[in-house]
């Protein structure tokens, strides 16, 4: 006895649009802007809390003058350099610690001693050593980004399925090939999560570092305009920090999906 297939029920277009992730994000953004506008109208003090329209106008003027792109490019370049340095330092050390319990016993206490110290706490000493310039914010970001990458790399190596390692050894795979073809692919999803965490922490730290120790960048621009009581420009640069951070994280997500297509379920909460 054959059973007829149940007819599919067409979902209206407006319902599909309402469930779309992008549309939900747009609705959240609109609600945030409306709340912001209401608070600005209630505060009635453009110096303390400018309206969204005032910030949008300031953002447009900054973009037209090229000042916005200049500071954003400088901060992004510093971030890129810091992440590369942090990856070069943390990833090899993380693999070594994950593979060697003896090395981990020596290094882990030092890591756990330094890790709770905020990168911002090093700014006064770094300012004395490096002075005002590009080196100080890069150093602070490297310090902040180093620990998430290191710890996630160690965790990724330790989470490698022992059955995979045993199977590779049974097939006569050498240590170098084992590392390249078994350990690295298995640990890579966790390493990528650490990279996203490192980016988030470093991008937050750059603002504090540039407030004091840099003659340019988004953090410098925020402090400079605050001293001039140009609050709409301050909010405009803060908005740019959020947008750049969101776009960079989206880029890291895409890179994570491209590098580790077999680990779609491993996402950053």
Image (tube, rainbow, N blue to C red):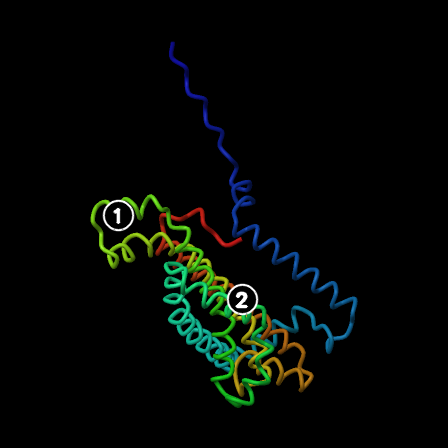
Q: Residue furthest top?
A: 1
Image position of 178 with respect to 207: above or below: above
Q: Position of residue 218 (x, y in %)?
A: 55, 78
- Is residue 200 visible from the viewing direction of this image? yes
Q: Which quarter of the rendered picture does the N terminus lie within?
A: top left
Q: Is residue 176 left or right of residue 238?
A: left
Q: As rendered, which of 128 and 203 lies closer to the eye?
A: 128
Q: As rendered, which of 48 and 182 lies closer to the eye?
A: 182
Pointer 1 residue:
168
Tally of numbered tags: 2
Q: Position of residue 186 (x, y in %)?
A: 36, 52
- Using the numbered discs, state the Cα–Cα distance from disc 1 to disc 2 in whole angstroms: 33 Å
Q: Is residue 33 left or right of residue 158?
A: right
Identify the element where label 2 is drawn.
helix
Q: Residue furthest left?
A: 172
Residue at point 38%, 50% (across, down): 160
Q: Position of residue 18 (x, y in %)?
A: 56, 45
Pointer 2 residue:
112
Identify the element where label 1 is drawn.
helix
Label 2: how many residues lie within 10 Å, few (<14), some (14-19) or many (20+)? few
Residue at point 73%, 78% (across, down): 47
Label 1: how many residues lie within 10 Å, few (<14), some (14-19) or many (20+)? some
């Amino acid at each position: 006895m054959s059973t007829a297939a149940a007819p599919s029920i067409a979902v209206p277009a407006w319902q599909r649009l309402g469930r779309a992730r992008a549309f939900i994000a747009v609705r959240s953004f609109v609600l945030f802007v409306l709340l912001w506008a209401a608070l600005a109208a209630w505060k009635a003090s453009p110096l303390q809390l400018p309206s969204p329209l005032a910030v949008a106008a300031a953002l447009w003027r900054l973009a037209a003058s090229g000042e916005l792109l200049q500071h954003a490019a400088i901060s992004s370049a510093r971030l890129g350099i810091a992440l590369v340095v942090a990856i070069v330092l943390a990833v090899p050390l993380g693999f070594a610690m994950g593979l060697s319990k003896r090395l981990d016993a020596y290094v882990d206490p030092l890591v756990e001693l330094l890790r709770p110290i905020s990168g911002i706490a090093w700014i006064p000493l770094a300012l004395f050593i490096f002075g005002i310039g590009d080196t100080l914010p890069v150093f602070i970001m490297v310090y902040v980004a180093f620990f998430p990458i290191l710890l996630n790399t160690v965790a990724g190596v330790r989470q490698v399925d022992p059955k995979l390692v045993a199977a590779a050894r049974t097939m006569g795979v050498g240590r170098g090939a084992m590392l390249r073809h078994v350990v690295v692919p298995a640990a890579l999803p966790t390493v990528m999560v650490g990279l996203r965490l490192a980016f988030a922490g470093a991008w937050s730290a750059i603002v504090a570092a540039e407030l004091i120790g840099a003659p340019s960048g988004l953090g410098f621009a925020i402090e400079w305009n605050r001293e001039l009581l140009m609050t709409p420009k301050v909010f405009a640069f803060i908005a740019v920090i959020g947008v750049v951070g969101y776009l960079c994280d989206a880029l890291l997500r895409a890179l994570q999906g491209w590098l580790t297509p077999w680990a779609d379920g491993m996402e950053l909460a």
